[in-house]
Image (cartoon, rainbow, N blue to C red):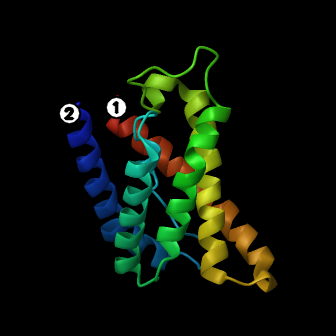
Amino acid sequence: MNSVVTLNIIRFIGLLLIQVLVLKYLDSEFSSYIRLFIYPLAILLLPVRTPAWIYLPLAFLLGISIDLFYDSPGVHASALVFMAFARPLILGFLEPRLGYGEEDVPTLNQMGFLWFIQYCAILLFIHILIYFSVEIFTPVYFIKIILSTLVSFVLSMLLIVVFNYIFNTKQ
């Protein structure tokens, strides 16, 4: 159990650093329609049986940490907490016929490519849609919200899949 906690702490810190030290500066090079998100993986890759009282505060802590670096008060935190709140619903929706095991972790290796893509795609889309909705916060820019969400979603999903293949996360 200690190795799982240690691995998730390292993942949490590593994804935070990648987001604020690399992707933040790539975002400024692109247009305002494109944002790259990798930090939601810290919540997405927590073990399936992680209780809500652990992952909801973790989502808030990670989101508010990202907000501190991006000067966006609460935008990342609200999107990540909403995604974390939706996580058990999506896990229930995608639950295999035999259910999840005690030690199951929603990774590419353990759950399979199709399951992992569905799981990440649904939750990442929710995260990005909420992010742009809160950032822009007006229905006047509905088209910009949808366009930004779609472009950022596709690029972030590609980044997440590549990240999972490079680091070959087993847990």
Q: Which mark, by number, is residue 3?
A: 2
> Is residue 5 shown left or right of residue 128?
left
- In the picture shown, does residue 75 fall above or below 102? below
Q: For residue 125, what is the image quadrant?
A: bottom right
Q: Which mark, by number, is residue 171?
A: 1
* Residue ID at (63%, 33%): 92
Q: For residue 109, what is the image quadrant?
A: top left
Residue 154 visible, this angle: no
Of marks 1 and 2, which one's residue comes earlier in the chain? 2
User: The residue tagged with tag 1: helix, strand or loop?
Assistant: loop
Three-letter code for the amino acid on which mark 2 is drawn: Ser
- In the picture shown, does residue 141 fall above or below 132? below
User: The residue tagged with tag 2: helix, strand or loop?
Assistant: helix
* Residue ID at (42%, 42%): 51
Between 42 and 34, the one lying in front of the other is 42
Between 22 and 169, the one lying in front of the other is 169
Q: Which residue is most to the top?
A: 98
Q: Which quarter of the image is occupied by the N terminus? A: top left
Between 43 and 109, the one lying in front of the other is 43
Q: Residue 148's spot in the image, x, y percent?
A: 67, 70
Q: Tell how many labels.
A: 2
- In the picture shown, does residue 56 fall above or below 21? above
